[in-house]
Amino acid sequence: GGLPRPGRAAPGMGPGLGLVLLAGLLLAAPAPARAQVAADPGALDARNPGTEARLVEAAGHVVLAHVLSGDAAVDRLAAAGLLGLSQVLYARSSVEPVTPMAVDLETDELSVLTFLYWPVTATAPAPSPAAYARLNRYLRSGGMILFDTRDADIAGYGAATPEGRRLQALAAPLEIPPLEPMPPDHVLTRSFYLLQDFPGRHSGRAIWVEASPDDAEQVEGMPFRNLNDGVTPVVIGGNDWAAAWAIDRAGRPMVPIGRGLGGGMQREMAYRFGVNLIMHVLTGNYKSDQVHVPALLERLGQ
């Protein structure tokens, strides 16, 4: 069967079972050749014909999806980026994504999707009220959107670039909680790889995630997040992750990243960030549970 709905634990699942599930997801390492079966480069199409059939497929499989931006070049790169990330996931974990898909916010059902990559362009059309309603249901149900302004986020989360200004306008009707720069103890820094940097084609700027509430329980000085199993509904940055993840039909990187060994390491760190994102949305706060086992046992009266 498919993986659990994003951000949702099965009924009656305690922390111990959550940790077992996490171990099962992460410890198996399929041979890299299998990655070619999971996400087929030959089937990739940024416009995604047969979307209805793909959404049916997504109900039983992990499918990484990107929002159509209206810019054909941006959409092609987004599709190629999610293909590269899907193959890395397949090769390094027991998560088995199938070929990524594009979604039209005006027509497509989002509830069956695990993860949405939204590349923001300066001229991106605003969704309709009905599309915003679907997006808000998706966020409330435990889904995640990665907003990427692709502009190196030169002034942080703000309006210093056309893409940043457009992001603010696009995000205004969404039910997005208060945000903060990702703290060094956030689950995203350790959901699979231990990370403190999250580069894409660009690097060095803050990534924004849901802020811990003021009354969040502190365990060993760390905020304990409970909403949506600890999954931040949105991640916002400008590092152009799809460009760093993107591969062509032969499996070769499409966009140069940095220079020499340093560029290769930057691309690797971009892939690791992508893996952490998907593991975070699939496993909720199980990794956080592992850190906070004493507090969880106390809550359960054990």
Image (cartoon, rainbow, N blue to C red):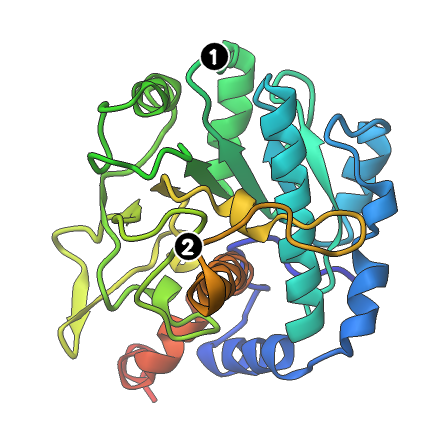
Quarter residue 140 falls in? top left
From this view, report whether residue 252 is shown above or below residue 56.
below
Lateral position of residue 92 relative to residue 18, left or right? right
For residue 296, side relative to residue 257 (left or right): left
Does dot 2 land on a helix, a strand or a loop? Answer: loop
Residue 198 located left or right of residue 116: left
Alpha carbon distance from label 1 to label 2: 26 Å
Which quarter of the picture shows residue 291?
bottom left
Q: Is residue 289 left or right of residue 109?
A: left
Residue 297: x and y in percent read 33, 84
Three-letter amino acid code at the position of disc 1? Ala
Instruction: Report x, y in % for residue 80.
Output: 68, 43
Q: Nearer the viewer, residue 199 or 188?
A: 199
Looking at the image, is 23 positioned above or below residue 160?
A: below
Residue 177 horizontal/vertical position (percent): 29, 38
Say which residue label 1 marks: 126
Look at 34% across and 51% down and name the residue there. Answer: 203
Which residue: 51% across, 14% down? 127
Q: Nearer the viewer, residue 38 or 63?
A: 38
Crowding near the residue tagged with mark 2, few <14, some 14–19, many ≥20 C-alpha atoms within 10 Å:
many
Residue under numbered circle 2: 231
Q: Which amino acid, by three-letter code, is at mark 2?
A: Val
Q: Residue furthest front?
A: 260
Residue at the image point whose x is 69% and y is 32% from the top:
102
Label 1 with label 2: CB-CB less than 8 Å? no
Mark 1 or 2 closer to N-term? 1
